[in-house]
Amino acid sequence: MGLRDWLGLKRKKPPSRIGGNCSFCGQAPTESKKLVAGPGLFICDSCVENLSDMARGQEPRLATLPDACSFCSKSRRKVRVIVGDEKASICDQCLGLCRDILAERLRSG
């Protein structure tokens, strides 16, 4: 038993590298310009753009997807629209946050 164990301190794990394919189109991080990480899933910049366009064209509260956003878990009743497919879905609010993240990354280099 080491000093850290005796004091009840846990060793910090090294930060994990963000990696994984886009949960919507399957594109690898090396194939996309930017990749935004969500809770256990990822979305690439082109899917953010495509799904944002799709969300703008939807009627409020209409979706042909699961009843909750894969990113924030909000139900369909709490958001305007959910887009995606059976593997992963995203609400208009999370798409807005992803657009903001991507815009900030482009500004910062």
Image (cartoon, rainbow, N blue to C red):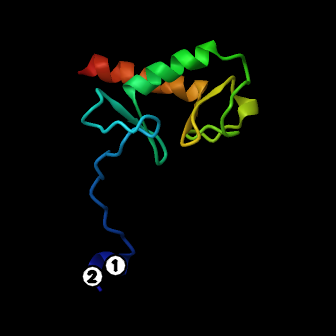
Secondary structure beneath dot 1 equals: helix
Mark 2, Cα crowd under 10 Å, few <14 / some 14-19 / many 20+, is few
Q: Is residue 101 visible?
A: no
Question: Which quarter shows the C terminus?
Answer: top left
Res. 59 image quadrant: top right
Residue type, numbered disc 1: Asp
Q: Is residue 23 visible?
A: yes
Report the front residue among 47 and 108.
47
Q: Is residue 1 above or below residue 23?
A: below
Residue 87, image x and y in percent? 54, 43
Secondary structure beneath dot 2 equals: loop
Residue type, numbered disc 2: Gly
Q: Are marks 1 and 2 in contact (CB under 8 Å)?
A: yes
User: Residue at coordinates 28% horizontally, 26% vertically from top-left?
Assistant: 33
Report the front residue among 10 and 51.
51
Which numbered disc covers residue 16? none
Res. 55 image quadrant: top right
Mark 1, Cα crowd under 10 Å, few <14 / some 14-19 / many 20+, is few
Question: Which quarter shows the N terminus?
Answer: bottom left
Residue 22, image x and y in percent? 40, 38
Instruction: Give the total number of marks visible in the rendering.
Output: 2
What separation in Å lies between label 1 and label 2 (alpha carbons)? 5 Å
**Residue that numbered label 2 is attached to:** 2
Q: Is residue 56 above or below residue 18?
A: above
Which residue occupies the extreme right position in the image?
77
Residue 6, image x and y in percent? 35, 81
**Residue that numbered label 1 is attached to:** 5
Residue 77, image x and y in percent? 76, 31
User: Residue at coordinates 72% horizontally, 33% vertically from top-left?
Assistant: 76
